[in-house]
Image (cartoon, rainbow, N blue to C red):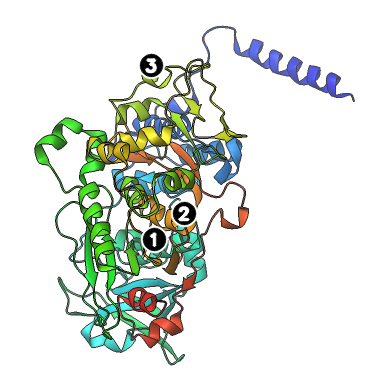
């Protein structure tokens, strides 16, 4: 039978069924049919169906590419319908609904597509695996434990409740958007293993929540199978002590600068610690310039300028940038430091101005709701092809040195320059160029770990591009991924979802670095052990490279 004839037969059968059913009003969708009475404390099935569809719409309308990481568009909608059809007639509680939706959102396949909040947890009584774990290579190492079990310090996790670490990693990928294997391990160490509700979701076969059975490989390579009891509130935890005292970061700015003398009395080094990148003045100015004039948080422009000036005066030969555990924020502070060390031209070259494709924004309804000071009218000024809501902006992308986004008027400033000048505090310095490339030490080293994410990762990749040395563990952030997330809220349950608005490709032409940026000097388990599992092992390792 020919394809045309088969198609005609299917259409004829379909038409007959439609006529038999009547030509009036379409039938009510099955998912809105009335069901059983809603159980106490639950949301009705109809509301949960509406929220599930709303969640899918938020992701599809906002995410630059919600399909490629999870089996394409069909795969996305297959997972959607699996969730829709799993909603029971008597409704679900908020936690039950959140548990149902986790695999659907995780299937998008990136770290920036996730729920803003999850299960409620008790930080004083976590109730999961009572071990503090650190990602080292592709293992989880015990770096904190109750005093009675301190002999377990330095051991590597083999299994939990009989489930091997490799299987735990695979299960984690099905419960949260994951960028790479280091991200999966980091999520296990910081969320899924320590907290009871997450552990129950990860290991549903875990029934006796008063205790948890773990298998560990000790530093001497022997195996220990231990049944750990749940500790009380604020247990007496033992952690390895550090040989060094690094300056704490005070206040909300998220960074601190210092000059440090190594513990062995070697040559002084300059040190910058970034714990997060969301509280310094310049990033707040970009979002709320009026309020920032009143609050006046610490300025990265001023403090980093003071740092490089003093480095030049002292003749400092090494600078250490510490972004371990940095969850992100705004990368502008990294670009400010690049400007002072390498100069304005190198900054723009590093950022890809005039070359290649480095990112595409998607302008959705949520994008503009999150940025009320931006609008399509302003974005479209001087464009030959105006953008519409839901469109993609390729103004950051170039072909043969020319932006893809053609302009009808003067070329104007590249988007990267507009981004840098959006902060009035940094704009003054950037335009004057007074301290552009003021001083660069002979050695720049970046300390990172699996907890280095988003804008924190920008410090790693930007300085690596400029010749810096990286030390530690590969970050959880994939170099070719997404960012600039916005928040959507579901109408009935109030569940909030985080969705990225930019596709950021640091290495668009190098697939070997698409998921993981290798570090130059990996903190191996053997080296970590040689430092006595020191919490600042990356810093100690860096000092040996000077």
* Residue located 39% across and 85% down the image: 529
The Cα–Cα distance between marks 2 and 1, rounded to whole angstroms, is: 9 Å
How packed is label 1: few (under 14 Cα within 10 Å), some, or many (20 or more)?
many
Quarter containing the C terminus: bottom left
Compared to residue 526, the image places residue 55 above or below, namely above
Of all residues, the one furthest to the top in this rendering is: 24
Q: Which residue is mark 3?
A: 377
The Cα–Cα distance between marks 1 and 3, rounded to whole angstroms, is: 41 Å
Q: Is residue 76 left or right of residue 183?
A: right
Q: Is residue 438 left or right of residue 393?
A: left
Q: Secondary structure at mark 3?
A: helix
Task: From the top left corner, tell me how far across and down residue 161 is, in percent.
Answer: 41, 74
Q: Which residue is mark 1?
A: 187
The Cα–Cα distance between marks 3 and 2, rounded to whole angstroms, is: 36 Å
- Quarter residue 382 falls in: top left
Task: From the top left corner, tell me how far across and down residue 383 is, in percent.
Answer: 48, 18
Of all residues, the one furthest to the right in this rendering is: 1
- Reading the chain from its start, which is encountered first: label 3 or label 2? 2
- Reading the chain from its start, which is encountered first: label 2 or label 1? 2
Task: From the top left corner, tell me how far across and down residue 436 is, in percent.
Answer: 34, 47
Q: Are marks 2 and 1 in contact (CB under 8 Å)?
A: yes
How packed is label 3: few (under 14 Cα within 10 Å), some, or many (20 or more)?
few
Q: Which residue is mark 2?
A: 178
Q: Nearer the viewer, residue 527 or 177?
A: 527
Q: Is residue 158 visible?
A: yes
Q: Secondary structure at mark 1?
A: helix
Q: Nearer the viewer, residue 267 or 122?
A: 267
């Amino acid at each position: 039978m020919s394809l045309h004839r088969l198609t005609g037969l299917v259409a004829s059968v379909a038409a007959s069924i439609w006529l038999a059913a009547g030509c009036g009003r379409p039938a009510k969708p099955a998912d809105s049919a009335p069901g059983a009475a809603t159980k106490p404390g639950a949301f009705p099935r109809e509301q949960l169906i509406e929220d599930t569809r709303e969640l899918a719409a938020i992701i599809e309308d906002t995410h630059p590419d919600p399909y490629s990481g999870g089996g394409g568009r069909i795969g996305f909608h297959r997972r959607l319908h699996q969730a829709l059809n799993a909603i029971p007639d008597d409704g679900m509680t908020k936690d039950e609904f959140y548990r149902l939706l986790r695999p659907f959102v995780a299937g998008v396949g990136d770290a920036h597509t996730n729920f803003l909040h999850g299960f409620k947890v008790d930080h004083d009584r976590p109730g999961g695996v009572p071990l503090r774990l650190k990602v080292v290579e592709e293992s989880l190492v015990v770096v904190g434990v109750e005093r009675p079990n301190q002999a377990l310090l330095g051991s590597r996790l083999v299994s939990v409740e009989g489930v091997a670490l490799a299987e735990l990693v695979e299960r984690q990928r099905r419960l949260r958007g994951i960028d790479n294997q280091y991200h999966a391990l980091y999520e296990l160490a910081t969320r899924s293993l320590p907290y009871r509700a997450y552990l129950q979701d990860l290991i549903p076969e875990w029934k006796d929540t008063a205790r948890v059975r773990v298998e560990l490989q000790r530093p001497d390579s022997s195996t220990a199978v231990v049944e750990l009891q749940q500790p009380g509130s604020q247990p007496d935890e033992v952690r390895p002590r550090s040989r060094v005292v690094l300056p704490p970061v005070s206040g909300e700015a998220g960074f601190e600068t210092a000059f440090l003398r190594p513990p062995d009395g070697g040559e002084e080094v300059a040190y910058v610690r970034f714990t997060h990148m969301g509280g310094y003045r310049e990033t707040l100015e970009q979002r709320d310039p009026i309020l920032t004039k009143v609050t006046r948080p610490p300025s990265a422009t001023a403090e980093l300028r003071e740092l490089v000036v003093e480095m030049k005066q002292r003749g400092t030969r090494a600078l250490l940038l510490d972004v371990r555990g940095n969850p992100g924020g705004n990368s502008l502070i990294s670009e400010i430091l690049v400007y002072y060390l390498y100069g304005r031209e190198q900054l723009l070259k590093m950022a890809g101005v005039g070359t290649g494709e480095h990112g595409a924004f998607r302008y959705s309804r949520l994008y503009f709701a999150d940025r009320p000071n931006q609008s399509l009218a302003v974005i479209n000024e001087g464009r030959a092809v105006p953008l519409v809501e839901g469109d993609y902006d390729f103004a950051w992308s170039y072909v043969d040195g020319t932006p893809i986004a053609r302009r009808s008027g003067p070329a104007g400033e590249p988007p990267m320059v507009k981004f840098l000048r959006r902060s009035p505090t940094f704009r003054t310095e950037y335009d004057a160029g007074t301290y552009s490339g003021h001083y660069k030490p002979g050695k720049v080293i970046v300390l990172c770990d699996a907890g280095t994410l988003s804008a924190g990762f920008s410090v790693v990749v930007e300085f690596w591009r400029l010749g810096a040395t990286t030390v530690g563990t590969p970050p959880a952030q994939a170099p070719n991924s997404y960012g600039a997330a916005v928040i959507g809220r579901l109408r009935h349950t109030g569940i909030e979802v985080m969705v990225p608005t930019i596709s950021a490709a640091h290495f668009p032409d190098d697939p070997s670095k698409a998921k993981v940026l290798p570090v130059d000097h990996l903190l191996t388990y053997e080296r970590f052990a040689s430092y006595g599992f020191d919490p600042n092992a990356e810093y100690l390792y860096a000092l040996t490279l000077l």
